[in-house]
Image: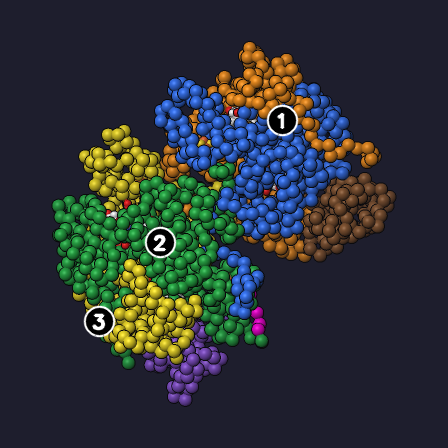
Chain colours: A brown, B purple, C yellow, D blue, E green, F orange
Amino acid sequence: MATFEWEDVKIEVDEDGFMEEPDVWNEKVALALASTEAVDELTEDHWKVVNYLRDYYKQFGIAPMIRKLCKQSGFTLKEIYDMFPSGPAKGACKVAGLPKPTGCV
Amino acid sequence: MATFEWEDVKIEVDEDGFMEEPDVWNEKVALALASTEAVDELTEDHWKVVNYLRDYYKQFGIAPMIRKLCKQSGFTLKEIYDMFPSGPAKGACKVAGLPKPTGCV
Amino acid sequence: MADDFPKTPLIDELEKGPWPSFVTEIKMAAKDNAAPKDLLGLLEQSYDEKICHWKHGGIVGVLGYGGGVIGRYNDLPEKYPNISHFHTMRINQPSGWYYSTEALRKVCNIWEKHGSGLTNMHGSTGDIILLGCTTDELEPTFQDLAKEGFDIGGSGSDVRTPSCCLGKSRCEWACYDTMAACYDFTQEFQDEIHRPAFPYKFKFKFSGCPNDCVASIARSDMSIIGTWRDDIRMDKDAITDYASNGMDIQKDVVDLCPGKCIDWDGKELSIDNSSCLHCMHCINAMPKALRPGTDTGACILLGSKAPIIEGAFLSSVLIPFIKMEPPYQEIKDLVEEMWDLWCEEGKNRERIGEFIQRMGMGNFLEEIGVEPVAEMVAHPRENPYVFYEEYYEEDDEEEDGD
Amino acid sequence: MADDFPKTPLIDELEKGPWPSFVTEIKMAAKDNAAPKDLLGLLEQSYDEKICHWKHGGIVGVLGYGGGVIGRYNDLPEKYPNISHFHTMRINQPSGWYYSTEALRKVCNIWEKHGSGLTNMHGSTGDIILLGCTTDELEPTFQDLAKEGFDIGGSGSDVRTPSCCLGKSRCEWACYDTMAACYDFTQEFQDEIHRPAFPYKFKFKFSGCPNDCVASIARSDMSIIGTWRDDIRMDKDAITDYASNGMDIQKDVVDLCPGKCIDWDGKELSIDNSSCLHCMHCINAMPKALRPGTDTGACILLGSKAPIIEGAFLSSVLIPFIKMEPPYQEIKDLVEEMWDLWCEEGKNRERIGEFIQRMGMGNFLEEIGVEPVAEMVAHPRENPYVFYEEYYEEDDEEEDGD
Amino acid sequence: MVDLKNRITDIGPPHYEQFLPPVIKANYGKWKYHETLKPGVLKHVSETGDAVITVRAGGSRLMSIQKIRMICDLADKYCGGHLRFTSRHNIEFMFTEEEKIEPLIADLKALGHPVGGTGPGITSIVHTQGWIHCHSAATDASGIVKSVMDDVIGHFEKADLPAKCRIALACCLNMCGAVHCSDIAILGVHRRPPTINHDTLRKQCEIPNVVASCPTAAIKPAEVDGNPSVEIDEDRCMFCANCYTVCPSLPLNNALNDGVSIWVGGKVSNARHEPMFSKLAIPFIENNPPRWPEVVGAIRNIIDVWRGDANKYERIGEWIERIGWPKFFRMTGIEFEKVHIDDFKHAGLTYKRSTHLTY
Amino acid sequence: MVDLKNRITDIGPPHYEQFLPPVIKANYGKWKYHETLKPGVLKHVSETGDAVITVRAGGSRLMSIQKIRMICDLADKYCGGHLRFTSRHNIEFMFTEEEKIEPLIADLKALGHPVGGTGPGITSIVHTQGWIHCHSAATDASGIVKSVMDDVIGHFEKADLPAKCRIALACCLNMCGAVHCSDIAILGVHRRPPTINHDTLRKQCEIPNVVASCPTAAIKPAEVDGNPSVEIDEDRCMFCANCYTVCPSLPLNNALNDGVSIWVGGKVSNARHEPMFSKLAIPFIENNPPRWPEVVGAIRNIIDVWRGDANKYERIGEWIERIGWPKFFRMTGIEFEKVHIDDFKHAGLTYKRSTHLTY
Ligand code: SRM
Ligand code: SRM
Ligand code: SRM
Ligand code: SRM
Ligand code: SF4
Ligand code: SF4
Ligand code: SF4
Ligand code: SF4
Ligand code: SF4
Ligand code: SF4
Ligand code: SF4
Ligand code: SF4
């Protein structure tokens, strides 16, 4: 466990930089986390992805499968990688404050 | 479908003498049906079996397995055959106004 | 009476041809009996409409018994009143299906008096099937038969009528006395045959050797199949005779031996009996030369059945070898043991084979107190999903159950 | 530096004995690098405590890729700080694992600069495994490697690094060019290798003949195994040589042929090629005399995997025979077809083999537009539970779907 | 009223010993070997030197008491009043004098009963009730059996096949004919999901049992017109009729859709190969009474192809195992279809998991 | 900051052609036959008359860059700067001059790398990470492998077995070593149900996925101390660790209970017999580092018994199929136990469904 600071944000993160306490997520935190994933700013498109992930997670308790994410958000996988260079799992889920994806490694 | 009459009881029965409308069952009907199954009178023991069958059916929507019937009612299978010579399925279930047992033939 | 037979152009076609005709049989019976006559009409109608006209179920019987009669009503009772009731009775055949004509004629007479005059000799479980009578005639038929020494067989969730190959009565290969064992078990379990109390049916079949002439491995919850443990008996001269009579021993015997344990050098046959799988093939092929050994007994297998519901099963080995001597107590004890378990934990309409599979054979064996042996499996497990039953706790000295 | 190695009496035992020692390798690397030194300590502790000290998961990677790096942290970072991060990178090996020393040395140099200096040559999927570096070094390592022409392989729910036997490069039996095909497919599916988007992993393995030297039938979702359709090529003189050199052709070849289609009369070998099962045995046994035919191609099978979760699978036949010619379009189209279906309907962590089994192979074939053929099954169904798909209604003229 | 006290019950079957022919009784357990004098005629020789001749006659299984009496007449005439039936409902006459063989065969012939059924041939077909007595039948039993036997009787009388060929018929998936392990099996199949009689279901059936009966979970409880009943997802139905067995209000019988499927390659004996299940060959043939020519033809075709290609002792399943299923389909001209591929519990194990293929 | 624009990506592996030794390149696709000059040394002859010698050296798989460089030195010295690795991580040196064979072997020996692994013998063990790199390992990989290879190296160098014997190791049920089809497989097993870290589970794991991950439905959602978590029915757990894979808060690793099981009789090739799965031989052996003598001994025993009884070309699974499993257990002295009997999905098909038994 480590503490990650960015501007006035100060959160606990694990070794991979995922939030330890997803409850304290807010939009500022998202910006802070984005900065670690080679995302310079969060555009409307970014937020669309982030919000979809958060909604899905709230409803089902799990992250959506990537195919579903693309379909529902309307972005191709390539576009998602363009937005989040470290990809939907490491990049987008981290920014969205979801638990660290497992299993699919 | 046929009509079966005994004393003042008059009920519709199928070819095997099982009630067509189990809802109209009452104790008098039980006596009437018993008369067709070589049961002369319904003793306390008979009623114990009949009532167990009815209760079980009401609760679970099925007739109990014979093993269960014996265990719960406290009678051996032999005793049940002594009471209901045509046996638990044909004899006791009929008297208790249950649907005709199937499948186990 | 023959001329008031119904018109049956379709099924009349089945009187043609060389094989014995069941239609002719029904007509024969119909000469003296109204029921078969109606049956002809009903059958013709089925042939015309391509559908059967029998209704589901029917629960009728004789007093004191819960099984042995299959109730049956047709769905056109006005049209075919003489078979509006048409129940069959299953009569327990004698071991090996041997009869005196005297006994058979008595059965015929009783059935002439009470029933349709039609039979199946025999049903596929093995009973004499008395095909068709009314509810009222069940009890009288039963009692008349009982007086002649016949009893009713099984139906419903009970022990079904056991059956056996003719075994020692006429077969040189019988490794135990199937007819005696079948009779003994049938008598032992009269109560279980007549008063259904199981989750589902239970069948015994006794075959004298692995040729399995009553198909026990495919059709019985407990299959008792004769076999031997010592060496195949061999008559060398008879082998030479087969060879000189033109038998291709290499091709027809050696190459087909599944144990790959026979050698034929053109003169002498030798068998590595320790690798023999007791399949019977070499013996079947050379009955005058080879015979099973003399340390004979049976292999006991469990669980075969038709496909409803988990799919068809073949029986599988429970006891690789056991001597078969009356009163077969060890086997009977085991049977009681497993019935207790099955009755306690089995689901409705769950055959014992399905039950074993659901609870796991290992657990089943443990419950009935039989040691697992490698003979029970075609091969050990392929998946690593092992229910190891104990584990150590950090502060344990001992092993701990979970 | 060697003298400040941790004390490792347990694992030191593994430096003894004739087989090359991985402990020695770690020590070699530890001479110039702190990470392997910590690894020695950690490993010794594991050996002492009989438990591993790596934590679950870790999600790290390089930019633009979703896979190819396995994140790993130890659970005693204070004690072993130099391996507190110890991620591995999977580097896509060249087809057939051929290298020039020049290229290999470059990889070594890069890994010396950025990583632990430890590798697996190779991982069991086939990659070069660069064993252990910190998060910060991932991207630089990747870019340095890329500059030398190397790229990262698969991990996660993507296409895994394809691999192949050496095929035509050195094997006389290769029925198609495995190395070319493997390279071609790898290039074709770069996106699918690097950006996980499937329900679960998907592996390709290419073997040149049924000997299957990359174990494709056991370890790949799609197994592409070379075979032939025409007659086995035969050099009669070479057969005679084998015989005269003492080979027992009857016992060692004929008797072991699973197609039972070889005859040997002591002089001539003849093969009934229409019954040949293309198992390779006779060819393996007499490489100088027999060879696969010349009408060669591949058999394509689907679905093998390790046991998690439905139990282990072997691949099963999808296309009994297909010519293997670049650009392999027919196969690639089929692959896309089935990925679409699997991605649409597959469950999370459901391999394609499990998916096929869950939806039924018949339905699967229908969806991907492949005709069922008898070659796909070991045998037709044994159970009668057939989903007949259409039935007639009473008032229909036509057949009706339900 | 029945006299409950003095009824005879639980006596079991008569003891077999009283029925044994004297030579059988005398040599019980002493038999040494046998030979086949001609198809349908066996001779068993005892250690004691005694021998018994057996003549096996084809039975029709469904027999009138009139016929049984005629058979008894023959047994009285030739066998001292003894006879037996076999496990496949043939009739066996046993005696010691070889010279009785031909007269008995002639008498049997006159009665319409062929002699045969031994050795590498076809014996009587194990079968079931069909339209004669069962409510569940998707086809008739006796009619098809008669039609097939009329066609293959030559193999009953001559025993001229590579090996035994056991045919069985069951008129529904309950498989009372135990067709699951036969060289050739004829199986009646329904192909239309049950129709629901909501009216009677309520009274006749135990809904939890009905729901539980369905192996594919196609049946769900439902309220219909205010009454408890069930609904069925027809796409999930594979026509096993288990629901019908436990509930009369769910009949599957349907004249337009019922018919017959053909299965091959099962066996029971342990001889050579272990016992095997029958496998699907022809998924569906429409009912075509009275003589089901398509079924008869299909079986004839399978037998002929097998007979032409198999080695001695090779039963149908063993033959197919040697040549492979693809060849079986090629040689018989039967089309391989989607439904041949298993999709029940063990389906995966039936997929071809090797490259052992012929082309 | 990384320069996102100018990064090189998706180039795939280098093309193999540039790495092929000249003789390989020249004769690509033209090979005619091969022979084995001695264990570990193959000679492939081309249609063109060319020939290539291959010397195969045992690799340790886990290699330092230092070692790789030394290997490269040898490849430079003998092979014009080319080398390859095999699908079982051995190292192959290829050249055309037979006289180089012995010097190369001597140099390899000096480096600690034995030559062999061809033909009917033992080659390198396919294995996995174990305590070197994986979180899931129930045993170490490299340590057992080294210990076993030290013991069986004779069969690597001599190829003196009835047939190939492929050994594989996987340190947990994920079976990255793909041990499911090996002649002998060593499999790390957990034997204690997961311990639940309720505290972290809430944050780290997707509970629906965790519940769904368990093949035996042992895991149920539960509230613990007011927080969502799961509970596990320990009796239903068979230690597959699938839950652990999807959720770090459910570790199964346990020093007291982890260990090794031994499996036999699998194969991959289609030669003779179709590919086969490995079957359970020894359910559990405790971890005994650093040299796991019980595991080494168990494998030695199986190899010796097989070697003593098998026919030429008979791999372990083929041998057992011939002699039968009962004999395998009798001959190896391994005890047959309850856990050998399958109780997973296809269990019924693994029961012995015939009387084909030896006594
Ligand atoms: C009469 C007989 C067929 C015949 O014509 O020979 C028969 C007839 C019936 N069988 Fe059977 N079975 C008959 C032997 C068999 C056999 C063969 C055997 O015993 O060797 C089997 C397959 C082996 C087995 O036990 O699995 C058999 C497997 C079934 C099944 C499926 C059982 C299963 O577990 O899969 C049912 C369904 C049921 O029990 O509800 C069944 C149910 C029935 C019922 C009672 C129909 C029903 O669901 O109510 C049939 C009554 C027909 C009628 O109206 O007469 N019958 N049944 C056979 C009994 C005659 C006798 O006693 O000698
Ligand atoms: C590195 C490697 C083992 C090795 O030492 O060689 C490996 C290592 C892991 N495998 Fe694997 N697998 C490796 C080849 C395999 C193979 C063999 C193959 O590809 O031929 C298999 C069996 C074949 C198959 O695909 O089924 C394999 C079947 C699994 C599974 C079970 C998959 C299944 O469907 O049953 C898992 C579990 C998972 O996916 O969550 C798994 C998961 C893992 C993970 C990622 C552990 C996890 O759950 O997170 C391991 C990371 C270890 C580490 O820390 O380095 N690994 N894994 C192999 C990859 C090296 C390479 O890229 O060359
Ligand atoms: C009479 C009968 C037993 C009984 O108690 O009724 C019987 C009697 C004999 N059987 Fe059988 N078998 C009888 C049903 C069976 C069955 C059961 C069945 O068909 O339902 C089988 C298992 C069939 C299967 O595997 O599907 C059976 C499989 C055998 C075999 C093994 C054949 C094989 O190669 O697979 C032999 C050995 C042989 O014929 O070489 C055999 C051999 C014999 C012998 C030679 C035994 C002897 O030494 O006397 C008997 C006369 C042979 C013959 O008919 O050619 N008997 N035999 C049955 C006659 C039925 C009938 O009327 O046709
Ligand atoms: C180099 C390699 C391919 C590669 O691209 O790397 C290879 C190369 C050859 N294999 Fe292999 N096989 C190689 C892995 C395999 C594998 C895969 C595995 O073990 O994981 C198999 C499947 C093993 C299995 O069935 O479990 C394999 C099953 C065979 C067979 C079939 C053996 C059998 O009887 O079952 C042969 C034929 C033979 O040896 O007679 C064969 C034959 C050959 C030949 C003779 C082919 C040829 O003509 O060149 C090659 C040298 C033989 C030798 O080693 O004795 N190769 N071979 C692999 C060497 C691995 C190693 O370092 O030991
Ligand atoms: S099973 Fe064996 S003992 Fe019984 S009749 Fe058949 S061959 Fe004879
Ligand atoms: S009984 Fe069967 S296994 Fe035994 S020797 Fe004879 S043919 Fe071989
Ligand atoms: S799989 Fe066949 S073609 Fe490839 S290396 Fe092995 S033997 Fe040669
Ligand atoms: S390849 Fe195999 S099946 Fe074909 S002839 Fe050779 S040994 Fe027989
Ligand atoms: S097979 Fe079916 S239809 Fe035929 S008798 Fe048995 S239960 Fe009735
Ligand atoms: S016939 Fe079988 S599958 Fe169809 S609804 Fe009834 S029980 Fe279910
Ligand atoms: S087998 Fe298990 S422990 Fe070993 S590397 Fe693979 S996932 Fe890790
Ligand atoms: S280890 Fe496997 S069986 Fe045990 S709880 Fe976890 S997922 Fe379930």
Instruction: Point out the stretch of residues depicted in magenta.
Output: E219-224
Is the CB–ligand 1 distance for label 3 below 8 Å? no
Label 1 or label 3, whichever lies nearer to me, is: 3
Q: CA distance from mark 1 to mark 3?
A: 88 Å
* Residue C217 picture location, percent across and down: 35, 51
Q: Residue furthest right?
A: A7
Q: Which image quarter is the N terminus of chain D in?
A: top right
From the viewer's perspective, tell me whether residue B58 is left or right of residue A36: left
Say which of A28 and B95 sits in front: B95
Q: Amino acid at mark 2?
A: Ile
Residue sitting at 74 percent across and 29 percent down? D146
> Which x, y percent locates residue D56?
65, 40
In front: label 1 or label 2? 2
Q: Could you say which quadrant of the image residue C277 lies in?
A: top left
Chain of the residue under label 2: E
Q: Is residue F186 magenta?
A: no
Q: Quadrant for ligand 2?
A: top right
| Amino acid found under the numbered disc labelled 3 | Asn
Same chain? Circles 1 and 3:
no
Q: Which mark is residue D97?
A: 1
Q: Position of residue E287 (x, y in %)?
A: 43, 62
Mark 2 sits on what residue?
Answer: E167
**Amino acid type, callout 1:** Trp
Q: What chain does mark 1 sit on?
A: D
